[in-house]
Image (cartoon, grey):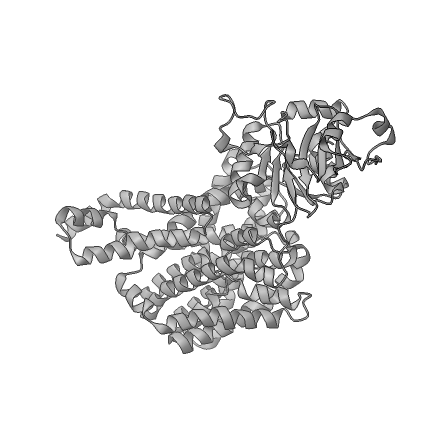
Amino acid sequence: MAADIAHHAVNLLPFKIALIGALGIGAQWLAWKLQRPAIVLMAIAGLIFGPLIGYFISLGAPEPIQGLLERLRLDPVNDFQELYRPMIGIAVAIILFEGGLNLKLKDLGDARHAVARMVFFAAPIAWVLGTAAAHYIVGISWDIAIMVGGLFVVTGPTVIMPLLRQAHLKSRPANVLKWEGIVNDPLGALFAVGGYEFIRFSQTEASMIFIFGKLAFAAIFGTLIGIVSAFGLAWAFRRGHIPEYLKAPIVLAWVLVIYVLANTMADETGLLAVTALGMTMANTKFASMVEMRRFKENIAIILVSGIFVVLTATLTPEVLRAFLGEWRVLAFVLIMMLVVRPVAVMISTLWSGLSWRESLLISLIAPRGIVAVAVAGLFAAELTALGREQGALFVPLAFALVFATVLFAGFFIGPLARALKLDAGDGDGVMIVGANPWSLGLAKALKDMGIKVTVADTNWRRLRGARLEGHATFYGEVLSENADYSLDHSAFNHLIAATPNDAYNALVCVEFAPELGRHRVFQVGARDGDQDDSESIAFTSRGRTFTSRGRSFDALTRDWWGGWRFRSTNLSESYTLEDLYKDRGDDMDLLLARKPDGTMEFIQPGQESRAAGATILSFCPAKDRDVSRGSGAKRDDGEGLAGPANPLPS
């Protein structure tokens, strides 16, 4: 009988793996579609296919339905058996490597000092206070409480990034929250590793000197092996010893090798080693970092999705019932959110340069993410294997804190930022994707109208003109996950995709439409007209048409080199749109209208009437008298001419 059950479980294993992948990635897609935190939807999926189906099975049902439920139910501990613990460990190692790979120190900017305070002061204070809360409120023994308090100092960057885009915070508090999450993700895991090592060594009845000496050795050894191996990989990449197509696979294999090697030399130092490996590679100059980013984006997303579903599914109906009815869990979560975090942040940010408003906002916004749950799942299994039954509380405690902090931050970050006057507002920021002579002329014209502009391009040299004009720039791929961390999403609420590639323009607009709103993403088309014909990209799969005449990229570029320029004109009762057409010609293109209240509205084909009574930005032929005056010449009718200081794509 036991052999039959085992054989049946093995036959079901491929189906269960496929189901986990479908649930995880499906939850990620649904979160993108609904613009909701993916972590919540992944947890719901795991709860439905784990404890909820298990509960229905326990109620009894007709045999066909019972068989279907048994097949659909996820019971990871029994499904994977002896593979469960190493599987979680390897996944957490790759996730922590991904976190370390995001930490590029030069990108900290003006938040460097405050982030250092958050790491070196706030995190230890939160560790101590969180440990006390876990012990006195939940009733966990001191040694396991040390692990709980250490792990829960993390704030998940994968959760914070969408929140920052939603709230449009000012740059300094946004940078502090972003980089604190990136740094504290591996740091909290390392605190938990230290606590676990203390428990493991203390069970050998060794002296305290031996225990702490072992911990120090493990920490130093893990860090050194990660750093040395990172420099070795970077050296091999720079010298050409590894071909391009093997770089990403070798990095993945190397992370696994370092994790296993470090654990073999000193148990559980693998997590520290791979974190140090990622951090060192992020700050080492070599040309293959793009491949590392691609590795991170693809592999880490799959692992995060799957592991989150797996860990949620390990919760049993009995644990959920006992936990949901336990007042101490609610008290612990509230204390962590409203006492531990604010006290730690307020103390650590004294004399840091942050205002009290910024400190208060940062103290209340601390959503926990995937690392908290993944590491909790790992150590819950490890502690249970050591005979510490209280370790089973790790996962439900982590889920309770994750759900509460994510929901609180999601609902209150916007109102809180506005109440504290820390929101950047829904101003008139525009991001232009694609640096070329025409788009740089547009950027200068927008800047002359007092509109903030960010110019993005994957070519550093093409961004030279934007840098010379003083525009904010983003060098990199705006569609990459790296843009979530490096691109200041609060700086713009409109987007213009202006590259020669119509399909790429459409893809950029589709990507940013859920964040900005479809009415705020525009693209330059491939052909003249309104781009709404059978041969164009479908209307639902592209941005809105830019310019009132819908000129193509080639036509706009040709007109630019033919002497056309951007002009802003104040329309009034004495100088109307009809007067402007008479002055500039019927082939003039209207781009946007700046209303008297400061808001702006892009003008599409057939919407010219919206220009009345506003300041109009147009693209039209230059007159001899304007050209002779040069860039920036002003006309008596309130019109100004704009072109880039360096129009050539140098």
Q: How many labels does the image show?
A: 0
Residue 211 seen in the figure = no
Q: Nearer the viewer, residue 382 or 152?
A: 152
Q: Residue placed at 35% from the left, 56% from the top?
A: 311
Q: Nearer the viewer, residue 257 or 621?
A: 621
Image location of residue 57, percent across then percent down: 20, 55
Q: Residue placed at 54% from the left, 43% from the top?
A: 517
Q: Residue furthest front?
A: 573
Image location of residue 459, percent across then percent down: 66, 35
Image location of residue 52, percent across then percent down: 27, 56
Q: Is residue 301 left or right of residue 235?
A: left
Q: Residue placed at 25% from the left, 54% from the top?
A: 53
406 w.r.t. 547: above or below: below
Q: Residue furthest bottom?
A: 136
Image location of residue 484, percent across then percent down: 56, 47
Quadrant containing the C terminus is top right
Residue 529 seen in the figure = yes
Q: Which of 106 and 534 is in front in this view?
A: 534
Q: Residue placed at 49% from the left, 57% from the top?
A: 410
| Residue 620 placement: quadrant | top right
Q: Is residue 335 left or right of residue 588?
A: left
385 w.r.t. 25: above or below: below
| Residue 415 placement: quadrant | bottom right
Q: Is residue 298 left or right of residue 624?
A: left
315 w.r.t. 581: above or below: below
